[in-house]
Image: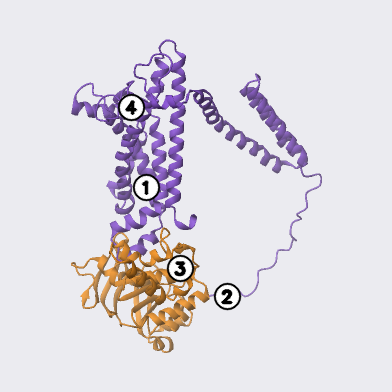
Amino acid sequence: MTSLLTRPAAPSAGPPSLNRPAGRRPLPQGLTAAIWATSGLALATGFLTDLGGARGFGLAWLIAMLVPLASLVFEGRRKATDRFVTVLVVTAFMIAVIPLVSILSTVIAKGAPVLSAEFFTTSMRNVVGEGGGIQHAMLGTLIITGFATLISVPIGLFAAIYLIEYSDGGPTARGLRFLTDVMTGIPSIVAGLFAYALFVLIFGEGIRMGLGGAVALSVLMIPVVIRSSEEMLKLVPNELREASWALGVSRWRTIVKVVLPTALAGIVTGVTLAIARVIGETAPLLIIAGMTDSVNTNPLDGRMATLPVFAYSALMNPGVPPQPSIDRAWGAALTLLIIVMLLNLVARGISYLFSPAQRR
Amino acid sequence: MAHHIDVTDLNIYYGDFLAVENVNISIPARSVTAFIGPSGCGKSTFLRSLNRMHEEIKGAHVDGKVIANGQDLYASTVDPVDVRRQIGMVFQRPNPFPTMSIAQNVLAGPRLNSKRMKKSTADDIVEKSLTRAGLWNEVKDRLGRPGSGLSGGQQQRLCIARAIAVEPDVLLMDEPCSALDPISTSVIEDLIHELKTDYTIAIVTHNMQQAARVSDRTAFFNLNGVGQPGRLIEHGPTELVFSNPSEAATEAYIQGRFG
């Protein structure tokens, strides 16, 4: 072994100067703020006046581009590039947010006036023109999605447990993962046709049933539940499993009492996302659950209305006069949004209650 | 309680790879046996084979005999889950269960095995185990708080309390102090001294001073080169191994000439 007792020779040149090169000054604070404000003003004008959103956006963008230009004059190239890219990133974010804001504002603006106690407590049975409500569709959506969740969560969770806790990454696990990925890409109409075909085999031609809708939705939900639960189980440190095994706890008990509670918050979030993904499905429910105007709470018997299908048919066959029906469609859309939001809140509550103690 | 462990002709494999070769050693009851040696020499693997924890790695298996209390731990009739109830383990990094409080962590062994017990019995176990682990006075006012809120040294003592709450005969410690500061380390070492009156203790350590301080017997493991299996070079009373080792390699390692 050689020893290194002599220090390496110090570099001969002194440290580089940290002073700004001549001719470079910081960008005046007021200038950037003024440009950003003007840009925001142009954007707001675009959306609020008849200048038009697109033109307002373009104008705002042109104004925002003054910042990198000014920066090029004052600060030099490197900073200017930084500011230019900042503008690009912010622009991309705004473009991504536009549809979301637009959908939310439109649905709230058009749907909110429709909401009333009557709207939630009556069905469309024997209603022509004004009045009526979405009780039947709301109940249908809750029942069908509820059953879909009941079917998918056990299957998805057990599959994820198999993949993470039991499989050795062999052909079975690889096959299961591949099929899950394929299933994620199944178009929802195909899931609906699958459920319809399945129930026709059992009950014969022309069958319509809420449970069928639940089966169709669970085909869409299962892969999402598997994937998200798998990711959450993967995050549980192996040390916790070892600690449990070393106490003489069997594999299954370790999973139930240590691994699942540790991952529960994430699993609940994943399941909520899966529900949110399927609760707005229209096509499969149109095929297998059908549409009706009356309340039907029996998922084993006959057609069952759901909010998305209700909104669809209220828009496509509005009747005469059309306006009340169209208004109800907006109301149904808003109700659907509210249900998804409430679900998210509930999931957050559950995650909070079960999150590892120190994070509270 | 506490009984000795006899290991004969033990070969430990990961798949086809022979990780530890031909170990013969007797670990006496109510004493501390330290395993020392350079990284990768198989001392942790050997320790984990003593309560069949290494089997949790896919493809890991052994041949040879490990006899504790007159029973071959690797006999086909023996359930590894039962082995681990008799031979507890403390890990390198403190790993209290994050979803449980301090008291629940101590009770994790009996509770996770769904043993029903009265609240008074449970309270007794918590107090006894925490007292034994030297943690009772520090945490008795906050038994309901999460175990992960304790300091590293306290967490490690909590893990020791958790391990002895199942009343094992043997306690295996895999570098229990390597993630701790010197003060916590000395607390744990004192604790090991006290625990050896009741338990058979086997400890893996990278710290030779620690082995000299806490152990009654020392076993030195070494390997000839990367990819070669680790072997038990020599073992004996700690003073002897440290003052007058019979093998040149042991002397070189203890004097810090390699490893």
Q: Secondary structure at mark 4?
A: helix
Q: How much space separates mark 2 and mark 4, taking CA atoms?
A: 75 Å
- On the same chain, marks 4 and 1? The answer is yes
Q: Looking at the image, do the residues carrying marks 1 and 3 touch, with CB atoms under 8 Å apart?
A: no
Q: Looking at the image, do the residues carrying marks 2 and 4 touch, with CB atoms under 8 Å apart?
A: no
* Residue at the image point whose x is 48% and y is 72% from the top: B138
- Within 10 Å of disc 2 (Cα), the crowding (few <14, some 14-19, many 20+) is few
Front in this rendered view, residue A49 or A337: A337
Q: Colour of chain B?
A: orange
Residue under numbered circle 2? A3
- Vertical position of residue A30 compared to residue B2: above or below: above
Question: For the residue marked with disc 3, what is the amino acid?
Answer: Gln
Residue under numbered circle 3? B155
- Vertical position of residue A34 compared to residue A172: above or below: above
Instruction: Look at the image and tell me whether residue B17 can be seen.
Output: no
**Which circle marks residue A284 in the picture?**
4
Q: How much space separates mark 1 and mark 2, taking CA atoms?
A: 51 Å
Q: Colour of chain A?
A: purple
Q: Looking at the image, do the residues carrying marks 2 and 3 touch, with CB atoms under 8 Å apart?
A: no
Q: In the orientation shown, which residue stands out farthest toward the top?
A: A320
Give x and y (percent) for residue A29. Answer: 76, 42
| Mark toward the start of the polypeptide (1 vs 2) | 2
Q: How much space separates mark 1 and mark 3, taking CA atoms?
A: 29 Å
